[in-house]
Image: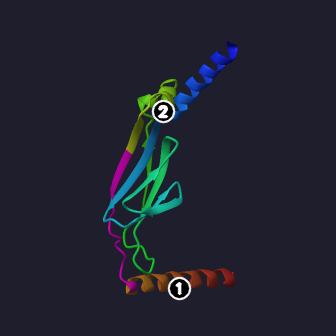
Amino acid sequence: MLKQKLGFIFIFLLSFTAFSGCVLRTLTIDSKPPGATVYLDNTPIGETPVTVPFTYYGTRKITLEKTDADGKLIYERKIVYEKLSLPVYQIFPLDFFSEIVLPVDIKDEHFFTYQLVPLNLPPTVEIQKNVLKNAEELREKFETELAR
C-alpha cells in the first residue's frame, strides 16, 4: 500500500515536470540606422536588430556603435542603462506557478530602439593643425622647465 502511494506521488510529480511551462525572456535591440554593433554588459551580442535571451532582471548596460568598413566610428557611440523590470508573475511565490505549474510558455519580451547620431569630425587638416599646436605648446613648456 505504501509503495502504491509513493508510486502515485512520484508519477504525480513527474507529470508536473513533463507538462510544465516556462518563461521565455528575450531582449530585442534595434537602431536607426540598422547594422550597429551591440554590446550587452560589455559583451558583444551582434548587430542590430538583435534578439537575445536573458535570465536575470535588473539594470543592463547597452552599448551601440556603428563603424565603417575600416573600423572607424561613423556614428556617436551610445551607452545606455536600461532597467528590465520584474513582471508580477515572476514575484515570489507566483514565480513557482508561472515557471513550473502552468502548462503554458509565457513570453516576456523587451524591445528597445535607439536613434544614432552621425559623428561630426572636424576636417583632417584642422585635426593636424591642433596636434601640431599642442605639440608646440608642450615643447615650449618643456624648454622653459629645462631652463630653470
Q: Residues within 10 Å of mark 1 (few under 14, many from 20)?
A: few
Residue 35 inside the magenta-drawn segment: no
Q: Is residue 76 above or below residue 56?
A: below
Residue 123 inside the magenta-drawn segment: yes
Total labels drawn: 2
Residue 13 sits in quarter: top right
Of the two numbered discs 1 and 2 on the same chain, state the one appearing first in sequence: 2
Provide residue 70's location: percent of width, then percent of height: 44, 81
Q: Is residue 64 above or below residue 134?
A: above
Query: What is the three-letter code of the residue carrying label 1?
Result: Glu
Provide residue 80's location: percent of width, then percent of height: 43, 53
Provide residue 124's location: percent of width, then percent of height: 39, 85
Quadrant of image for the N terminus:
top right
Residue at numbered disc 1: 136
Residue 19 or residue 64, whichever sits in front: 19
Residues tagged 1 and 2 counted as in contact (Cβ below 8 A) = no
Residue at numbered disc 2: 19
Q: CA distance from mark 1 to mark 2?
A: 75 Å
Q: Residues within 10 Å of mark 2 (few under 14, many from 20)?
A: few
Provide residue 44's location: percent of width, then percent of height: 51, 62
Query: Which contiguous range is marked in magenta?
Result: 110-124
Residue 73 sits in quarter: bottom left
